[in-house]
Structures are given as C-alpha cells and as structure tokens.
Image: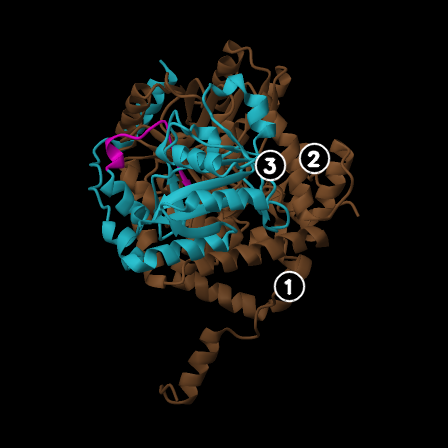
Chain colours: A cyan, B brown
Amino acid sequence: MSARSNILGKLRNSLAGTTPRPDEFDEGLVTRPWRYAPEDRIARLRSLMEAVHTEVHQCRSDNWPELVADLLNKRNLTNLLCAPSKEHGRALQAHFEATEQKVELLAYDRPVEAWKEELFWNVDASLTGTLGGIAATGTIVLWPDRHEPRLMSLVPPVHIALLRASEIHDNLYDMMVAQDWAAGLPTNVLLVSGPSKTADIEQVLAYGAHGPRELIVLVLEDV
Amino acid sequence: MNQRIPVTELAPDFRGRAEEALADGQLRNNFRVAMDSLMTKRANAFPDADEREGLRELGNRLKAGALSRLPDLLEQLEQKLTENGVKVHWAETVEEANDLVHGIIEARKGRQVVKGKSMVSEEMEMNDYLAERGIECLESDMGEYIVQLDNEKPSHIIMPAIHKNARQVSKLFHEKLGEPETEDVNQLIQIGRRTLRRKFMDADVGVSGVNFAIAETGTLLLVENEGNGRMSTTAPPVHIAVTGIEKVVPNLRDVVPLVSLLTRSALGQPITTYVNLISGPRKPDELDGPEEVHLVLLDNGRTGAFADAQMRQTLNCIRCGACMNHCPVYTRVGGHTYGEVYPGPIGKIITPHMAGLDKVPDHPSASSLCGACGEVCPVKIPIPELLQRLRQENVKDPEQPQQVKGGGAKYSRTERWIWRGWQMLNTRPGLYRSFLWAATRFRALAPKKAGPWTENHSAPVPARRSLHDLAARHLDNNGGRPS
C-alpha cells in the first residue's frame, strides 16, 4: 500500500456517511468593507504603501522616464535593469539616450544561470511594469514573464514599479474576478506591498531583509 | 548575562521547564513585551468588530468545508499540480517525508539547501536529517537563522527568535560569524542579509512550506515579509515545498479572506509584504525560476485527528500564532517550555496527534481555560473545548481502546476510586448525612496534608456544623418559615 492510498483511505473512512458541506463563500464579506470611490483609490493605496516605507510618486504617463532618471541620479546608482522588449522599457531607453544619462540600462535577456553572480551583486536597481494595484491593502500585482523574470523585482536593492492609475482595483477579490485569474495562473504571481522587511529581532522593524531595500511606485495617470 | 537556553539543557518535563522559565526575568520580559505588542497590533488591524466576526465565521466555514471533502480536494490538487508540471509526493510519517526530500536532493547531487520558514520541516527535523547525510540545510528567515545559528528551536511559530534581545543576537553574530558587536537592529539585519545572499545564490535546492494549496488552479501560496521565501523558491534550480495535508482549499477566491485573517491575526498587517503564488516550474521560454518543483504532502498524525469529528477542528489551523500571543500561560513560560514543535494553545491540541498524548501529558492542564485563544482564533477553533476533551482522554482507562493517540497516560487507579466513592456519597442521601455528621463532629481528625494543595495552602478543615444542619435548626426555631 502506498502512502497516498493509505492517507486517502483513512480520510475517506473517517468521512463515511457524511456529506460535504455546501459552498458557503460570501463575497460581500471580502468586498463590502473594501469599496472606494474611484478618486479615493490612489490616496488609499498611497497611504498604506507609504506607511511601510514605499516611495510613491504620481506622474503622467508621458513624463515618468524623467522622474526615473532623477531618482537614480539622486541615489548615485550606476545601472538599472529594465526590459527593452516592453513598451515602457523602450520609452525609458529613448529618454535615457536623448538626455545622455550616465546610468547604464541592463536587460534580463539570458537565463539566470548565465549571469547569477552579476545579477546578485552588481545590479543597483530594476524597473518593471505591474498588472495593477489593490487599494484595500496597498498592493501592487506582478505577473513575471520572460521579459521581466521573477528575480528582477526581488534581487536588486531598489525596485521601481510602474502602476497605471486606471488599473488600481478596490480589493483583491474584485481584481481576481475582473481578470478571471481562476481560469489560469502564470508560473508565479506576486502581491507586493512594500520593500522587504523583518521584525524578527525584538520586533524592531528593519527594511531590506532579503529583497529590495527600497520600493518606488510610480502611479501613472493618463494624459 | 547568559540567557541562552539550548534545548538539550532544558529540564526533561514541562513542569521543570516551566519553573526554569518563570525564574528567568529576561526571558519573561522579552515575551511580555512582544506579546503585548502583537496583541495591540492585532486589535488595531480589526477596528470593526462586526467585520472581524463575519470574517472569522467565513474562515471557519471555508476550512470546515474544505475538510468535509479533503480527500477529493487532495486528489484535485495533485491532478492540477501535475498538469502544471509540479511533482506531488505523499508521506505518512516524517521519516518518509525526509527520505523523499533527501532522494530529490541526491538525484541532483545537491549539497547546499536554503530553507524558507516552514513549521512542517520543523516537524520533520529536516535540518538534522540532512546534516547527518552531509547536506547543509540553512534557515533563511532572519529569526530562524538566528535560532539555527545558536542550535536552538523556534520559540514562536511566527517570531522564532522572540526570546532573544538584540544584545544576545549581537553576541551570537560576533561569536559565530566573527562580526563586530552592535546592538543596532538594522546593522544586525544587514549582516544576516549579506551572509544569506551568498547562500541563496549558491544553493542547489530551496525548501519552503505552504500557507495555502489551491486545488482549483494547482497553486502554492506563501506569505512572508522578508523575501527569503521568494529567494528560496526562485533562485535555486530545485524547489521542494513541504506541507501538511490540511492546507488545501478548493478555490482561488478562498484565499482572499484566509490571507486577510492570517496576516491581520498574526502580525496586525493588512497584508504581508509578499504574497507569492507558485503554479509551476520554469517554462521553456522563461529565464529564471526552478527547473523542478516538488510538493511533499505530509500526514504525521493528521489523519488521526481527522478521524474524530471534534478533534478534526484542530486541522482548521492556519498557523497565525494569535492563540499563543494572547495566552497568559505562553506569555509567562515562553515557547521552549512546551518542548515540542508547536507551542502554546494550538500546540497543546496538535501535538497529541503527532507525538501522542502520553508524551505531553501536562499540556492539556497547563491552561487556565480563560478562553482567550478560542476568542481570537481566526478560524474559530474551540481550543478550550478541545483542551477539556484532551483532559478527559488523558485519564481514560489505558486498558481500553484510545480515541486519541497515547490517551490514558494520566489514569490513576486511586483517583478513579476516590471519584467512585465521591459519587456513591453524593447519590445516597443516608450515606451522605452520616458522612456529614461524622465529618463535622470529628473535624479535628481531618488530614493535615492533602497532596499538592497543602504545599502552598493551609489544609481545609470542615466547619463545626454543616450548612444543612444550620438551615434545619434555623427552620425549627422559626416554626418552619425561612425568615
């Protein structure tokens, strides 16, 4: 007898003669307390994210590359990992070339094994898009793909994320229903609600435990 | 100042360890401060009592519903995960689970393992098992790392190193890592970050637990604040997740209320920094993520708890730790006193199914039954009720078949006879009256020693006359009227 059949057999035996409980999910309980007027969503997201040391900037969907250059220069960072195959990557590249920025743009264009050492120790910052945001909890949602792989938002000490204001949802439930997540998830989905942190020593909050020390969210409002 | 309490140096039984802990002022202070703060944070995270109670009720129903069709859900989960490219393994015992994990690592000739926080791997004592076989298994959660470095066990399921203060951590890092001493928590964390980053990069295998396994989509959900869970599950070429069979939920939407209950109850956070949903290994066109993902489903006594409809509620647990944060006993004696993987109220009701009640006979009674644990439990496990049930199981006749593993350990023939006598006395009026007459008239002969009671109290002496006698005389004097 295999462990599998033993375990399932014991469980079935214990349930003999019982009927499964009906589905008692109540979507009102996870949506009603978490509704916001469209104009309040950014403020809610912003205040929650700032409360956990996220830097949030509101900018226009056409001038954000300038802000990125400023943020990097202010921190004296020498390079930025971004995806040249994405629209925002191209926009950033164009701006950096036009303004002759010194910051070097790096691309995650080969398997991690080919440049792990460099990725872990020499990349200063990364910039990725997001699938949207969640006002209720102050969260951005990432679906990593081949252009913006999983480690891109985790390993560099500074992570800059672009969030379209129109893609901020009230709560997680609304977002997963609106985008029909249950129909199929990618390899990895991430809800990110601030820079990496820990309170494991004396409950004193310290940022930059293993992931980014800084999370910068640029909320793009359409022009 | 040395407050280090390695497991091997602790007293062998609960009572002895409790006495040691109660006498340790630093330890008590560390816990008191931490528990007070966690209780306040939880309370602030649920400002609306109606919302909180509605959500707890929903959490209870979702978990009870999932358990009511657990075998079907496990099969669905296995099927979905397999479709997604995840290999699913089953283990009845911790030995089997360790053997499976070791086999997966050996197949890749792995020598270095990094582990995200996982209580199931603590159940398995995986670190020791792998170390004995020449494989380094390093904890990567800051608290777990500190505890491992000092050869200790976690003292809290969410805050493993809560019993230590910054000075103690500083000393430890100085001794073990050769780092300069500092009591600045930020600097201490940066030491941990630097040391572990190299390990994440070099590891052959990453191990993690699972907070919720979603059957509908074949997804493993992990919550964390540090990013070590994401590192452990993404950077190494192989990811092995280990979890108990009770962690499965039917639908993706179910995790919305459950994650909210978990992070708010555990840490008072609306959500953790990272919620990581993993649905498969690296796809051919992807550039990172593990090439192999494995899930080990562990029983280790859970089917035993499941067999009893009342004890089954134990499996509702989502491991938030709120019950220990609110427990007056835990706060005073700390996690190590319990001597088992899961401390506090939840530990008292889980451990018997894993280790046997006879291994932890003092646990069910190490409670004032104040009810705080049951009141804060996000999935409404009636912990006090289950503790009372375990007290009964503890004293059942060991000759009879037991409903809980290791039941009957506290059975005492003398105690059984005393209760029989007590029952006889109280159900036969003639006998009762004779006893009262004798007990009041010969009160001077009452025993001066009454077991543990008289260690700290003066011995009880019967009154000169019983209330019964006094009432009868009063009625006689009053012509039968009460007043």
Relative image position of residue B212 (x, y in whole percent): 38, 36
Q: Is A186 included in the stretch rendered in magenta?
A: yes
Is there any visible trace of residue A144 in the rendered image? yes
Is there any visible trace of residue B125 in the rendered image? no
The quarter holding residue B309 reads top left
In contact (CB < 8 Å): disc 1 and disc 3: no
Per the model, the C-alpha gap separating discs 1 and 3 is 48 Å
Between B50 and A166, the one lying in front of the other is A166
Between B296 and B350, the one lying in front of the other is B296
Amino acid of disc 1: Ala
Circle 1 packing at 10 Å, graded few (<14), some (14-19), many (20+), is: some
Label of residue B144 in the image = 3
Amino acid of disc 3: Glu
Q: Earlier in the sequence, mark 3 or mark 2?
A: 3
Judge depth for marks 1 and 3 and give the one in front.
Answer: 3
Amino acid of disc 2: Asp
Q: Earlier in the sequence, mark 1 or mark 3?
A: 3
User: Are marks 1 and 2 in one subunit?
Assistant: yes
What residue is shown with label 2? B150
Q: Magenta part of the protein: which range?
A: A180-192
In which chain is the residue bearing label 2? B
Q: Is B287 included in the stretch rendered in magenta?
A: no
User: Are marks 1 and 3 in one subunit?
Assistant: yes
User: Are marks 3 and 2 in one subunit?
Assistant: yes
The quarter holding residue B109 reads top right
Relative image position of residue A208 (x, y in whole percent): 58, 42
Q: Secondary structure at mark 1?
A: loop
What residue is shown with label 1? B459
Between A92 and B202, the one lying in front of the other is A92
